[in-house]
Amino acid sequence: MCGKYTEKRNFLSFFAVIIIDYSMHIWYNMLNYKYNYNSLAVPCAHKGNERCRNIMRRYGGNMKKRIKRLLALLVAGAMLTGCASGQVAQSSEVSINMVDAGAYDNAVQPAPVTTEAEQTTASVAHTAPDTVEREPERTTAATTESAADTTTTVEVMIASSTEATTASTPTEATTTTATTEATTTTAAATTTTAETTTATTTATTTATQPKEPVDEPSEIVKNSYTALNHAEVQGVWISYLEYIDMMQGKTETQFRANIAQALDNCSELGLNTVYVHARSHGDAYYQSKLYPWSKYASGSINTSPLYDPLQVIIEEAHARDISVQAWINPMRLCSTSDMAAYGDYTVSDWHSDSTTRGDYVVEVNGYYYLNPAYEEVTDFIAEGAAEIVSNYDVDGLHIDDYFYPTTEAWFDSAAFDKSGYAQLAEFRFDNCDRLVESLYDAVKAANPTALFSVSCQGSIENNYDKMYADVEKWCTNSGYIDYIVPQIYYGFDNSTQPYLTCLSRWEDMCRIGGKPLVVGLSVYKIGVEDTWAGEGKREWITDSAILSRQLEAARECTSYGGAALYSYRSIYSCDSGVEAQIWDEIALYTQLIK
């Protein structure tokens, strides 16, 4: 029967080529769909929830129909090819080869997965223990420094090279990252230059209107900006406490002048990275559709300051070749007294709903905290991270050590009872892992060049016993952080956490995982008694050159990625009784980094 139509072989040859080419096109789209789904689902990486099903429906189409259509076309193509002569077969072969070598390969294809070894970059983040020595506003945190020296919580953040990513979670943590070759952990000088990322002149003083975020917070929009990160991070934390004087109730012109002066001060000291609060209490210092304006911006929660503080910081910092790490506290929310004015946002909805109040949003010592036991909550936190990185040219995202605010079982008992876990600690470790992983994924989906860092407590024991933060897993495995910034706020003579011993333990973990180590150092202890240091409690009063000696020791580490100071106000708004001693220390420190 085929021979009956041999006279039509030229037409059939052409038609077979068209069918096979179209079949390949459908097959490619199906593969590309799968990749796109995996990319788009980053903030809700757990395929079971409704958001991901919506994404599948939106981007996948009706897959059954596509598969049926593909099979039908393949069968038809096979029949026609068999009926045609060798000329048809040769023609179809040429067509397929053209597809393989041309249109198919040149189409937008899934990017190759970069292994951890290929991304080994130097960067570190810094955080202070959630304890007595945290920021005054944080004294309600449930982490006490029992056997270990859980010193003041620090909120500093640093980031480094564009190829490296780092993680850190300090109270005010610092993180630094540096690009390294796939086979080394040494920071490479492949960081984005000032010429490619920022203007070298002072940022304009024209009015900066709040940016309008994307309409669909659950859809991650890629930011094409190339992040500015330095091979060696030299950072400082600027927290919401500094904002009270710099920003609260100020006009844009006033705030711009204040932050410009602070950044000039940083440059004079040789600092190249600032960890600045973008969200401290379930609020925002930027235009957000997920969180209300912070009271530390305008004076009242959910009241706009009429400009965009984060955008101003970015403009002024980049004009000085300073990297901006957006620092958020992912779980801590506002005080109980502020919730009434919080506004119409997801958090207030959860608080108002009797089915989620006390589960999704939990009160601890006068403050509310998000509960990471629920995927809806960690998805929401990740959306907030993506919102910042998508809409603003930040160079990284930084979190500190505010994980679980208490070790008491009542905090998440309802979720634990339904979880199937036998041990509460294991349950909480997995929850924090999911939170950190989702933040990392969200940052990379929004801007692959931006870094994610965590500033955890310097005491490794406290991270496990108090925070439920599996820092060893994060440091030794890919997909969690780009770099770590532990808050090693201990003196050399500290009885329970001597600096060199603690530094060595962090170095061991970072070396194994190829993660840059950015060391968080304490300025606020200079000249005062270190209550938890045992026999070394007067070290910060009697000894000198502590910070510079600590930096020199850190630079001996093979995983060294930089250092971060806690905090800016400890340098420039210190008590007059210790001011001279602090500046003697800072002078010696800056000689090493300038």
Image (spheres, helix red, strand yellow):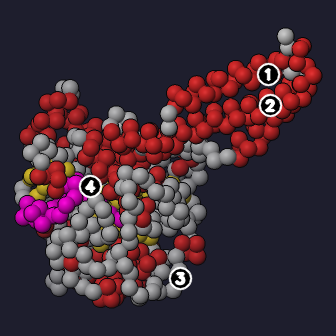
Contact check, label 1 and label 3, Cβ < 8 Å: no
Q: How busy is the neighbourhood of tag 2: few (under 14 within 10 Å), some, or many (20 plus)?
A: some
Cα separation between marks 1 and 3: 65 Å
Q: Which of marks 2 and 4 is nearer the N terminus?
A: 2
- How far across and down, in percent of the image, does residue 152 sit? 19, 63
Residue density around tag 1, few if under 14, some if 14–19, many if 20 or more, within 10 Å:
many
Q: Are marks 2 and 1 in contact (CB under 8 Å)?
A: yes
The local secondary structure at tag 4 comes to loop
* Residue 15 - label: 2
Q: How far apart are marks 3 and 2 (CA)?
A: 60 Å
Q: Is mark 2 on a helix, strand or loop?
A: helix
Name the residue located 13 percent from the left edge and 55 percent from the top edge.
368
> Could you tell me if the residues under marks 2 and 4 are in contact, i.e. CB atoms within 8 Å?
no
Residue on which disc 4 sits: 330
Residue in view at x 70 percent, y 20 percent: 75
Query: Is residue 329 found inside the magenta-colored segment of the image?
Result: yes
Q: Which amino acid does label 2 sit on?
A: Phe
Determine whether, in the image, residue 289 is placed left or right of residue 466: right
Q: Badge 4: how crowded within 10 Å, few (<14), some, or many (20+)?
A: many
Q: Are marks 1 and 4 in contact (CB under 8 Å)?
A: no
Q: Earlier in the sequence, mark 4 or mark 3?
A: 3
Q: Give the range drawn in magenta.
A: 326-347
Give the CA distance from mark 1 to mark 4.
60 Å
User: Which sits earlier in the primary sequence, circle 1 or circle 4?
Assistant: 1
Can residue 195 be seen in this snapshot?
yes
Q: Earlier in the sequence, mark 1 or mark 3?
A: 1
Q: Where is residue 195 in the image (x, y as percent from the top left)?
A: 58, 76
Give amino acid for label 3: Thr
